[in-house]
């Protein structure tokens, strides 16, 4: 069972006595102790906090967010491995983001995105577990009066090897808590791991299955009111006028609250009452300059970037123009991808309570606890120490809950109704039509081949929106969005065998807000590059696998996963009549991935994806079962984007309002997924996002093999897949 008991800052940093004789452990960071707190435990940035209870239960405090990806369990495995504790007694709870504010940091980066939940936490969480083990072992040695080198820890028990005497962790915890935290903490060699690398069951499964796990949308507090909001249907529009009388006359309605120039809310006893009153209230919007924008206009605007003279350069190697001039064959293709909503099952929500004493408390599902903390404080006009954050499990994130717009709105409402908790829930329509969408992009690829079918030059021109320009313009590098080149920048690009290469981006921003959608720009770029590589292979008269192998000789890890996927899928071996294969590879978020898809297309153009075989090398695999589950889940997400999901713009607004118009993949369309985890060691890669990028291009390449049709724009629902 996973525990989510919240602690305030003073409770969090208390000594062993405050936890019933247990051990509370942390690491010290430069900058010293937090003023005003008990100094028996000192917070340090590169540390993990461990609480060992008298009954040997070990509570691991987690800074990252759990949204279904298994980070909670993976991080606990890392700690438990070094701690040498009894895995059956491991629990986990979230640490409050407010312990990290200003320069009083205890936990490092608490955000969960970019598949960083485990891979950027590895060092400090393992050291936290190892240090606790060392202190417990030393406490036992002192009690026995023996050299610490004669003692060994395993399964929450310290044993004195010469005599066979034993002491439990729970018994040793109080004494261990009084010892100095060791400064030098050696970590286990991977060959000695017993918990890391094992497909252990998730520690939060039981609560998920019996319904006892509390998501933020489940929060119930004494005296709580509920709020529903309406925002300008056109991005950039403003609230012009409204008449609150009809809403206020409805049963259960307490308040009509203006949040800002673009947002108004109704507060009632129940959420349904608030939402119905909001729908009944006459609201007039000034829709602004973008009221007539539509998808066709946006696509035409993006297209202007494909041949624009100005573009930000990611890679430039050799002389592409000369390669094209001397080519035996020149191939060109234009691809494109659509806007996509994150479409989390749990819509945006946050509960906030502002009290008369000038303090604010929120209950929130967030991928970035510190950002939610800062957003709440800013919205309330309070200092960070006046704001308490209760972080709860997320009903899906996919990048959307890295933003804090819904947190600010909840606080803005609560500030106008002090003393009462206010739970804000977005309607599904509001959630669908006011997201931070995956950017719309188009891509023009031009390739040159010599007489022997070797690639002599490649130009990849991406045109479209920039995430950084919308969310973090200060992070642009000389006006260039470096994130736009994910998967095709110099460090990640596998095809180093291409002698002349140019990869650039012409920025074309629209009024539609964009953000980090699961896999971010790897998804589009992998489709563009991996499908075009197949086009080059066809033009060269070569097998797609062999063609890739020739270009990947300088990238052995890329090549290794490609070979595993091909071997496990039986590339080159006969398939049932009508079934065809497609292949691709990609590197992203620290991991190497490749996939082979098997599909058939009926005479009527109906697509069936029979199987996708995926190979992934994350360096070290913390939990192979979770990696397989993540791969399967990411394929559902990626295949939905490939097949049917799409956001369009009509009259300046997102046209899709619910799942009847924004379609997602159904169970009947899901293929069999085989995941082969091939960790090569030496590094820690992500999992939640790398695998999503290989599903779509593998399927698209297989569709070409089956039909002779090259599909270059998504989603597939707009295309006739009958054989050419």
Image (cartoon, rainbow, N blue to C red):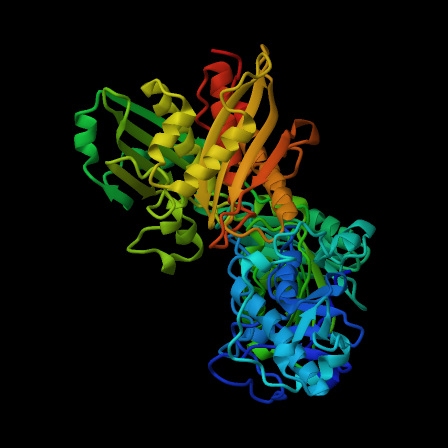
Is 236 placed above or below 532 here?
below
Q: Residue at x 32, y 51 (%)?
A: 480
Farthest residue to the front: give it: 162
The quadrant of the picture occupied by the N terminus is: bottom right
Q: How many marks?
A: 0
Describe residue 523's horizontal placement relative to residue 537 as left or right: right
Q: Residue at x 55, y 35 (%)?
A: 614
Is 96 placed above or below 199 here?
below
Q: Image quarter for residue 20? A: bottom right
Q: Image quarter for residue 552? A: top left
Where residue 693 sits in the image (x, y, percent)? 50, 39
Describe residue 174's horizontal placement relative to residue 230 as left or right: right
Q: Is residue 94 visible?
A: no
Of the pair 492 and 376, the residue shown nearer to us: 492
Of the pair 56 and 203, the residue shown nearer to us: 56
Describe residue 19's horizontal placement relative to residue 337 as left or right: right
Is 107 placed above or below 231 here?
below
Q: Residue at x 76, y 82 (%)?
A: 21
Is 315 placed above or below 367 here?
above
Q: Is residue 42 visible?
A: yes
Where residue 314 sits in the image (x, y, percent)? 30, 46
Where residue 404 sits in the image (x, y, percent)? 56, 60
Where residue 544 sits in the image (x, y, percent)? 41, 24
Q: Residue at x 51, y 60 (%)?
A: 120
Q: Image quarter for residue 559? A: top left
């Amino acid at each position: 069972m996973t525990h989510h008991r919240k602690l305030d800052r003073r409770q969090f940093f208390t000594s062993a006595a405050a936890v019933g004789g247990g051990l509370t452990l942390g690491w010290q960071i430069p900058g010293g102790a937090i003023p005003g707190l008990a100094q028996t435990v000192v917070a340090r940035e590169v540390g993990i906090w461990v609480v060992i209870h008298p009954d040997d239960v070990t509570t691991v405090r987690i800074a990252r967010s759990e949204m279904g990806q298994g980070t909670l369990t993976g991080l606990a495995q890392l700690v438990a491995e070094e701690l040498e504790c009894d895995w059956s007694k491991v629990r986990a709870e979230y640490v409050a983001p407010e312990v990290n504010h200003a320069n009083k940091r205890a936990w490092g980066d608490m955000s969960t995105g970019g598949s960083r939940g485990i891979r950027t936490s590895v060092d400090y969480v393992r050291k936290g577990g190892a240090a606790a083990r060392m202190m417990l072992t030393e406490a036992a040695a002192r009690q026995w009066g023996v050299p610490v080198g004669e003692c060994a820890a395993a399964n929450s028990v310290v044993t004195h090897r010469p005599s066979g005497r034993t002491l439990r962790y729970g018994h040793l915890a109080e004494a261990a808590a009084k010892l100095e935290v060791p400064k030098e903490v050696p970590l286990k060699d991977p060959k000695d791991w017993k918990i890391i690398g094992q497909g252990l069951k998730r520690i939060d499964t039981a609560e998920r299955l019996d319904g006892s796990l509390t998501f933020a949308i489940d929060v119930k507090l004494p005296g709580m009111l509920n709020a529903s909001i309406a925002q300008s249907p056109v991005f950039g529009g403003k609230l012009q006028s409204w008449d609150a009388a009809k809403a206020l006359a409805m049963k259960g309605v307490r308040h009509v609250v203006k949040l800002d120039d673009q947002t108004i809310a109704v507060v009632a006893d129940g959420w349904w009452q608030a939402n119905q009153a909001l729908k009944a209230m006459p609201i007039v919007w000034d829709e602004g300059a973008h009221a007539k924008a539509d998808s066709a206009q946006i696509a035409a605007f993006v297209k202007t970037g494909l041949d624009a003279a100005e573009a930000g350069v990611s890679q430039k190697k050799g002389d592409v123009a000369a390669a094209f001039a001397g080519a035996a064959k020149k191939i060109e293709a234009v691809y494109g991808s659509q806007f996509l909503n994150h479409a989390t099952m749990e819509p945006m929500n946050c509960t906030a309570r502002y009290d008369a004493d000038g303090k604010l408390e929120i209950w929130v599902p967030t991928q970035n606890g510190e950002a939610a903390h800062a957003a709440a404080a800013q919205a309330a006009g309070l200092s960070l120490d006046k704001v308490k954050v209760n972080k709860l499990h997320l009903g899906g994130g996919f990048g959307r809950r890295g933003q804090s717009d819904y947190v600010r709105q909840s606080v803005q409402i609560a500030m106008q109704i002090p003393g009462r908790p206010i739970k804000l829930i977005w309607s599904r329509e509001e959630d669908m039509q006011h997201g931070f969408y995956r950017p719309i992009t188009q891509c023009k690829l031009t390739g040159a081949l010599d007489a022997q079918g070797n690639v002599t030059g490649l130009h990849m021109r991406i045109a479209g929106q920039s995430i950084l320009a919308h969310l973090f313009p200060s992070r642009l590098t000389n006006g260039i969005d470096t994130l736009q080149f994910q998967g095709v920048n110099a460090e990640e690009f596998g095809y180093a065998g291409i002698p002349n290469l140019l990869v650039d981006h012409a920025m074309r921003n629209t009024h539609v807000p964009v953000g980090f959608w699961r896999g971010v720009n790897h998804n589009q770029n992998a489709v563009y590059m991996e499908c075009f590589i197949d086009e080059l292979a066809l033009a060269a008269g070569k097998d797609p696998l062999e063609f890739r192998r020739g270009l990947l000789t300088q990238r052995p890890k890329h090549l290794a996963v490609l070979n595993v996927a091909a071997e496990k899928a039986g590339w080159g071996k006969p398939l049932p009549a009508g079934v065809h294969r497609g292949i691709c590879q990609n590197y992203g978020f620290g991991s190497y991935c490749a996939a082979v898809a098997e599909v058939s297309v009926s005479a009527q153009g109906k697509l069936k994806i029979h199987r996708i075989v995926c190979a992934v090398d994350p360096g070290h695999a913390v939990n192979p079962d979770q990696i397989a589950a993540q791969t399967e889940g990411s394929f559902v997400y990626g295949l939905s984007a490939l097949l049917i999901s799409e956001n369009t713009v009509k009259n300046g607004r997102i046209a899709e309002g619910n799942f009847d118009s924004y379609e997602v993949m159904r169970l009947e369309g899901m293929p069999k997924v085989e995941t082969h985890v091939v960790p090569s060691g030496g590094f820690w890669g992500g999992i939640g996002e790398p695998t999503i990028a290989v599903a779509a291009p593998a399927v698209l390449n297989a569709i070409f093999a089956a039909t002779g049709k090259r599909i270059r724009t998504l989603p597939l629902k707009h295309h006739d897949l009958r054989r050419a």
